[in-house]
Amino acid sequence: MSFWSALSAESRETFWRSLQALTATRIVISLVLLAYLAFDHKDVASAGPHLYADTCIAYLVLAGAFVLASVYVRKHFLMQVVLQIAVDIGVISVLYMAAAASRGSLVILYLFPLAGAAILAPRLLALFSAALVTLFLLIDSLYQVFLGAAGMPLTQAGLYGAAFFAIVMVVSRLAARLIRQEELATRHGADLKIQQAINQIVIADVDDGILVVDRDGHIFAGNPAAQHMLGLANGDSGFALSEVPALEPVAFAFSEWQQQVGPASAAGVARAAFVTVKPYRDSGGGEAGMAAWSGRRDLAAHLKLRFARVDTVDEASERCVIFLQDVTAIENQAQELKLASMGRLTASIAHEVRNPLSAIGHATALLAEDLHEPGQARLLKIVGDNVARVNRMVEDILQLSRKVQPNGDPLLLGPFLNELKTEFDETQSVADDIVWLGNTGAVPVRFDALHLREVLINLLTNALRYASGGVGSIRVYVVTDSAGGMELHVQDDGPGITPEVRAHLFEPFYTTSSKGTGLGLYLARELCLNNAAMLDYEYRFDASGFGVRAASGRFVISFAQPLGARGVTSNRKATT
C-alpha cells in the first residue's frame, strides 16, 4: 500500500474518478456484448448461446455493483482495482472460449482491463495481468493444436502477448509521468495558496496603500489602506483613475512615471511623487467612474506615490502596482523637529549674527560715500545685497519663534482681497488687469487678517515671478466644495512645479532662486497652520485637445470650517 499512501489527497481523488470512469465504461462494454449476441447469435451457437448470454448478463450486473462500490465505498482502492481487473479478464476469457469464429475480435477486449491496470495499479500488477492474458492465449492455442481444431496460431498468440506487454509498459510509464506532474502541480498549488494567504495578511495589515492597475490606470484591486486613503468603498474597481476628478493627481503621476520608465522597462520602483487627493471634489467626472466610485467624499490626504511594473507575458495583461503612503503625519513631525532646532538656534542668532551684520552694513554704507569708481561701487552693492539677504533670513528665522495667537474674528474675503489687490498692484508696479479676482465667497472665514495678508503677498510675489504678465495671468478665487469647506486658490499661467521640486516645496531653506531664502513658503504654511488652515500645492487638469488633460499647478489655502458653513451650496461653477 506504499503506492497509495504516497499519493496526495488530490491525486487520490483523481484515481477514484478514473476508477469510476472505468466502471462506467465496463457497463457500456457489457451492453455492446449483449447487443452483439442479439444481432449475430450464430457465431456462439456451437458453444451454447446460453453460456454467452449468462456471462454477459452477469458481467452487466457486476459492472453495476462496481459502479456503486466506487461511488459509495471510498476505501480499499487497490483491492477494488484488483477485483475488477480479475473479473474483466475472467469474463473476457469465458467469452473468448464461448465464441467460435469471432475470437480474433474478442482478443481486443483484453486491452480494456490491461490499460486500466496500467493506469490505476502499480506497474508490477499490470505486468502480471498481461502475463496471465498471454499465458491464457498460448495455452488455448496449444490446446486447439492438440485437438486438431481450427484456432489462433501459436505465433499470433505470442504476438498478441508481446503487444499487450508493450502497451502496458507504455501506458504505465505515461500514467506514472502524469501522476508525478499532478503531484508536482498539487504541491505548487499548495505552496501558492500558502503564499497567497501570507500576501493577503501582509497586504491587509500594512500601513501603506497598494493599488493594482493596468497600463491605462483601471483599478483591479486595492488593500484597505489604499481604500481609506482614496475614499474607496470595499469592492470599488473597474474604473480608471482619470475618470474621477479627485483621483486625477494620481492618474497624472502614474502617466508621468510611465513616460519616464518606458513600456519596455524592467520592473522597478521609480522616484516618489507627491500628490494631494480630495475625494469630495467629484463634479464633472466621468459617469462610469463616478458610478463605480462609491466611497466617502469627506477626507483629504497628502500622499507619497511609488510605482512598480509587474512582469507579465504580454502587454494586454500588463499590471502595475501603485504604493501610497500618507505623509501628512510624517511631514508634520519633520516640521516640528526642524522648528524645535530653529528655536534653539534663534536664541543666539540675534547676538551672534545680527550684530555683525549691522556692523558690515554700516561699514558698507560709509565706504559707499567715499568710493565712487564703478568697480568699487559694484563690489559694495554685492556686499550690501548679501547683507540684506542674510538679514532677511535672520528676520524670517526669528519670526518662526513668535507664535502670536491669531485674531479669531470673522473675515470677509471680498473686501479684504480687493484691498490687497490694490496694494499689491501699487507696490509691485503691475497693471491692474494682471491679477484677476474671481468669486470671493459670501461666507466669512476664521483667519487673522495680518497673517492672511502676509501669506497672500508671498504667494502673489511668487506667481508674479513666473507668470507671463498677460491679462489675467494671475488668478485668485474662492472655491466652496460639497463638504462645506472653503478654499482660496492662487494660480498663474507659468510652468507648473516639477514633482522633484514639489517634494521639497515647503521645507525651510529650500529654494530654486538664487535670491531666495527658502523660508517664504514655509512661513506661509506655518501661518496657515497657526490659523487652523492648510496651505498646499495642487496640480490642476485642463482639457488640451485630442482628449488629453494637461496638468498645471496652483496654491490652495484650505480654511477651517467657516462660520455659517452648514447649508452652504456648492459654488464651484463660478470658478476656473
Image: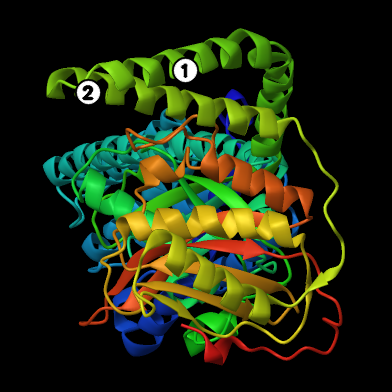
- Residue 283 position (above or below residue 383): below
- With 298 as the anchor, is 536 left or right in this view? left
Residue 218 visible within the image: no
Residue on which the image places disc 1: 362
Front residue of 124/411: it is 411
Residue 433 visible within the image: yes
Which of the image's four quarters has the N terminus?
top right
Whichever of callouts 2 and 1 sits on the residue coming sooner in the sequence is 1
- Residue 289's label in the rendered image is none
- With 166 as the anchor, is 271 left or right in this view? right
Quarter residue 268 falls in = top left
Q: Describe the element under mark 1 as helix, strand or loop.
A: helix
Front residue of 421/379: it is 379
Residue on which the image places disc 2: 377
- With 524 as the anchor, is 218 left or right in this view? left
Front residue of 488/192: it is 488
Identify the residue at image location x=62%, y=42%.
523
- Residue 97 position (above or below residue 359): below
Quarter residue 142 falls in = top left
Residue 572 at x, y percent in the picture? 58, 86
Classed neighbour count for the residue bearing mark 1: other residues with Cα under 10 Å, few (<14), some (14–19), many (≥20)? few
Identity, as a three-letter code, of the amino acid under mark 1: His
Q: Describe the element under mark 2 as helix, strand or loop.
A: helix
Identity, as a three-letter code, of the amino acid under mark 2: Ala
Distance from Cα at disc 2 to Cα at disc 1: 15 Å
Quarter residue 573 falls in = bottom right
- Residue 65 position (above or below residue 3): below
Identify the residue at image location x=36%, y=74%.
434
Residue 479 at x, y percent in the picture? 61, 79
